[in-house]
Image (cartoon, rainbow, N blue to C red):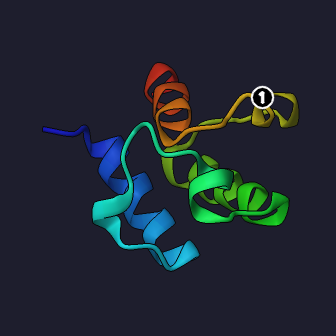
Amino acid sequence: MESEVFERIREYLADQLDVDPEKITPDSDIVEDFGADSLDVVDMITTLSDEFGVDIPDEEIENFHTVGDVVQYVEDRI
């Protein structure tokens, strides 16, 4: 069973990037697999930061490649 954080991030990405939620896995590359651009990534980080109450510094964003990277970062801080 996937974590609640993963489920919420998957739901957000599916809606924001118009992707079938079933195609979103922890190993999915946000840019390569879903065609997200830098604005999509910044929007995602801003939304997730607000939703989970987690501060995500700009310098950390470059470390987020996969959905799992984002999930792990958020889970480590909530």
Residue 8 in the image: state x and y as whole percent. 36, 55
Work out whether residue 39 or residue 49 is closer to the camera in this orientation and state it.
Answer: 39
Question: Which residue: 69% across, 63% down?
Answer: 36
Residue that numbered label 1 is attached to: 60
> Is 3 left, or right, of 10 in this rendering?
left
Q: Residue furthest right?
A: 59
- For the C terminus, give its image quadrant: top left
Q: Residue furthest front?
A: 32
- For the N terminus, give its image quadrant: top left
Work out whether residue 53 or residue 58 is closer to the camera in this orientation and state it.
Answer: 58
Residue 30 in the image: state x and y as whole percent. 60, 51
Q: Is residue 36 above or below residue 16?
A: above
Helix, strand or loop for disc 1:
helix
Please count the marks in the image.
1
Residue 75 found in image quarter: top left
Question: Which residue: 72% across, 35% down?
Answer: 56
